[in-house]
């Protein structure tokens, strides 16, 4: 683990922590002190953005009550980015995959914001 500020810790072997640190490039759509949003490199919809906390939280299961405000900011940022990316009106999906059976492939908490196509229920 590497301390990058008083509150933020990253892991050296985490892909998303390396993106936060600037070691790996990403097509960013938003960044502030707590969150980073960037285009998914393997999009599952015409608009597919990942929104991540800059602090390393392995999955939703590892979040704590102390992360409640951060998680709320992440969801609000998804809604505001949906407006910016012009997918709010027709509709969009926000998904947080958790652990392997839930479809999580990068073990750093992240939300998928997807739109510009029709989504089915239940998801596959």
Image: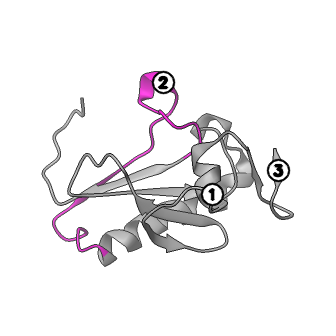
Q: Earlier in the sequence, mark 1 or mark 2?
A: 1
Q: Residue at x 38, y 71 (%)?
A: 81
The crowding category of the residue bearing disc 3, from other C-alpha atoms within 10 Å (few below 14, some 14 to 19, many at least 20), is few
Where does residue 2 sit, x and y in percent of width and height?
A: 82, 50
Residue that label 2 marks: 100
Q: Is residue 77 above or below residue 59?
A: below
Q: Is 103 part of what is drawn in magenta?
A: yes
Measured Cα–Cα span from mark 1 to mark 3: 14 Å
Task: Give the number of the disc on residue 2.
Answer: 3
Residue 71 visible (yes or no): no
Where does residue 28 sit, x and y in percent of width and height?
A: 46, 68
The quarter of the image holding the C terminus is: top left
Q: How is the image coloured?
A: one colour
- Along the horizontal axis of the image, is 104 left or right of 22? left
The quarter of the image holding the N terminus is: top right
> Where, by quadrant of the figure, is residue 92 drawn?
bottom left
- Along the horizontal axis of the image, is 41 left or right of 4? left
Q: Which residues are magenta?
A: 85-109
The crowding category of the residue bearing disc 1, from other C-alpha atoms within 10 Å (few below 14, some 14 to 19, many at least 20), is few
Task: Give the number of the disc on residue 23.
Answer: 1
């Amino acid at each position: 683990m590497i301390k990058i500020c008083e509150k933020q810790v990253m892991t050296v072997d985490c892909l998303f922590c390396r993106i936060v640190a600037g070691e790996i490039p990403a097509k960013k759509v938003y960044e502030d002190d707590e969150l980073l949003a960037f285009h998914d490199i393997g999009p599952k919809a015409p608009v597919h953005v990942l929104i991540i906390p800059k602090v390393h939280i392995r999955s939703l299961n590892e979040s704590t009550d102390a992360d409640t405000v951060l998680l709320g900011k992440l969801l609000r940022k998804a809604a505001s980015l949906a407006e910016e990316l012009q997918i709010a009106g027709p509709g969009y999906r926000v998904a947080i995959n958790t652990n392997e059976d839930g479809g999580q492939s990068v073990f750093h908490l992240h939300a998928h914001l997807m739109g510009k196509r029709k989504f089915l229920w239940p998801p596959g």
